[in-house]
């Protein structure tokens, strides 16, 4: 893939991303982008969109360990919500712009592809929006179209109910750093 990208993508930093769907106090998505040995993280209540006219609130949260990005299962003891987490999407990413309060990434996931901009608009308030590029899909709703885990095909409800899902027995030991 890096061979294909050479020449038309200003590759500043090659890294990884993951989007998890998490049933906590409220059902929300967690967007995590690897920055060295941590995952920079934002909670995105409505999830990402491939429609470049859709602006999604992204609330910055604390950095997470890389291993957190590999978790699919149920967080035991969560006070509200089932604690279920699925790996909704993940893949490689290039950070093409990294200014204070403004981040532009190109994602290569199974659901999310192309450019996305994260822009700080206030105290603990950022906006996530799809870049207008070939991967943009105006009018689409990727969250509704493809709700299940890209890793196991399970929905968060199935994980919460303890279903085994297809092709997996649950928590994966997939190595975040290797692929
Ligand atoms: Mn969360």
Image (cartoon, rainbow, N blue to C red):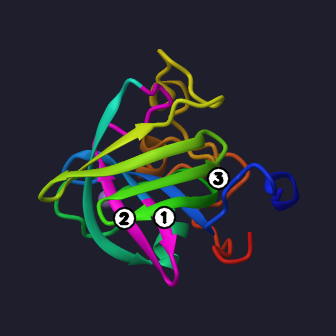
Does the image show residue 74? no
* Residue 157 quadrant: top left
Residue shown at 56% from the left, 22% from the top: 137
- Residue 62 is labelled as none
Q: Residue 80, percent across and down?
A: 18, 56
Q: Secondary structure at mark 2?
A: strand
| For the residues bearing labels 2 and 1, Cβ distance under 8 angstroms | yes
- Which residue is the extreme one toward the bottom? 37
* Residue 24 quadrant: bottom left
| Rendered-image quadrant of the C terminus | bottom right
Disc 1 crowd rating (10 Å Cα; few below 14, some 14-19, many 20+) is many
Identify the mark nearer the N-term, 2 or 1.
1
Q: Is residue 86 left or right of residue 53?
A: right
Real-space Cα distance between discs 1 and 3?
Answer: 18 Å
Residue shown at 57% from the left, 66% from the top: 171
Identify the mark nearer the N-term, 3 or 2.
2
**Tag 2 residue:** 41
**Tag 1 residue:** 33
**Tag 3 residue:** 151
Give whichever of 78, 125 is nearer the camera. Answer: 125
Identify the mark nearer the N-term, 1 or 3.
1
Q: Residue 74, percent across and down?
A: 40, 62
Give whichever of 98, 127 is nearer the camera. Answer: 98
Real-space Cα distance between discs 3 and 2?
Answer: 20 Å
The magenta stretch spans residue 21: no
Disc 2 crowd rating (10 Å Cα; few below 14, some 14-19, many 20+) is many
Residue shown at 61% from the left, 67% from the top: 12
Q: Is residue 165 left or right of residue 34?
A: right
Q: In this picture, which residue range is highlighted in magenta?
A: 32-52
Residue 70's place in the image compared with 19, above or below, is: below
Q: Residue 123, percent across and down?
A: 11, 58
């Amino acid at each position: 893939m890096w061979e294909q990208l050479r020449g038309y993508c200003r590759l500043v930093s090659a890294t990884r991303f993951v989007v998890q769907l998490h049933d906590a106090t409220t059902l929300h998505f967690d967007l995590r982008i690897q920055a060295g040995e941590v995952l920079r993280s934002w909670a995105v209540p409505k999830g990402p969109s491939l429609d470049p006219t859709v602006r999604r609130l992204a609330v910055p949260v604390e950095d997470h360990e890389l291993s957190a990005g590999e978790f699919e299962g149920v967080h035991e003891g969560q006070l509200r919500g089932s604690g279920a987490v699925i790996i909704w999407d993940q893949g490689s990413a290039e950070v093409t712009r990294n200014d204070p309060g403004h981040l532009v990434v190109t994602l290569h996931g199974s659901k999310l592809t192309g450019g996305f901009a994260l822009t700080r608009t206030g105290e603990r308030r950022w906006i996530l929006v799809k870049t207008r590029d070939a991967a943009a899909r105006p009018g689409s709703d990727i969250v509704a179209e493809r709700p299940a885990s890209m890793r196991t095909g399970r929905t968060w409800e199935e994980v919460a109910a303890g279903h085994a899902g297809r092709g997996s027995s649950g928590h994966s030991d997939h190595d975040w750093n290797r692929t």
